[in-house]
Image (spheres, rainbow, N blue to C red):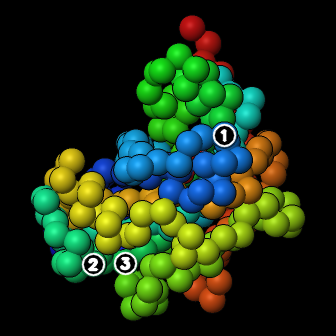
Amino acid sequence: MGTRSVTRFWEWGRKIICVGRNFAEHAKELKNELPTEPVLFLKPPTAYVKEGSEILVPHYSSDLHHEVELGVVLGKAGREIPLSSAMEHVAGYALCLDMTARDVQDKCKAKGLPWTLAKAFDTSCPVSDFIPKERIPDPARVELWLKVNGVTRQRGSTAHMIFSVPYLISYISGVMALEEGDLILTGTPKGVGAVHEHDEIQAGIDDVISMTFKVSRRASITQ
Ligand SMILES: O=C([O-])CC(=O)C(=O)O
Ligand SMILES: [Mg+2]
């Protein structure tokens, strides 16, 4: 492959590592306990969707939720990364949605099963353009917001994260090697809720970026 730039990280086919329950108010609204260490799950790179394409409700869900999150784009590989140098591994950021089939996730939770069907389906990871690191001098001071059909549903500051961006990088790198082009979704603030076919989702980071997606329904597979 010729030269490729991490500014188009979604084309690299690398890991998407998601952190759950990283905001106390969101853990509470879903009646989950506060985590004592980060809750992690994965999405495949086929989950990516960019502005101009639609978010598809999976055919097996009738309760698709939006979760607006700050994404961290890795610029440098590493394992067992110390907290003190964690930020050197960040190339930049992206505004992300962790689309979640909540009805399916609730069933998985009740049965103690993994969340793959609820979190990893095609179009479950809408992302903005790459945001260079300099545009966000402090990832603990990012104001995230999300509107559905013009009505504000989520607004929250990353100041309220339970585990900080450098801590997450260090922690995750002790579980799995981080690679250039990986994306870490850092968890959603409160206010998650359902979206339906024909809805318009608008999300943003104050003073930095915004993006818009339409919701459509995926046709069921006839077997
Ligand atoms: O609520 C969930 O499904 C966990 C999660 O992804 C989050 O907190 O961002
Ligand atoms: Mg999430």
Specify the quadrant of the image occupied by residue 179. bottom left
Mark 3 or mark 1, whichever is nearer to me = 1
- Is label 3 in a helix, a strand or a loop? strand
Outermost residue toward the left?
79
Residue 77 vs 132, above or below: the answer is: above
The residue sitting at 63% across, 28% down in the picture is 106
Please provide percent x and percent y for residue 204.
65, 74
Q: Which amino acid does the dot numbered 1 rest on?
A: Lys
Residue 132 vs 1, above or below: the answer is: below
The residue sitting at 63% across, 61% down in the picture is 189
Q: Which residue is mark 3?
A: 92
Q: Choose between 59 and 81: the one closer to the eye.
A: 81
Mark 3 or mark 2, whichever is nearer to me = 2
Q: Which residue is mark 2?
A: 87
Q: Which residue is mark 1?
A: 31
* Precedes in sequence: disc 3 or disc 2: 2
Residue 140 vs 169, above or below: the answer is: below
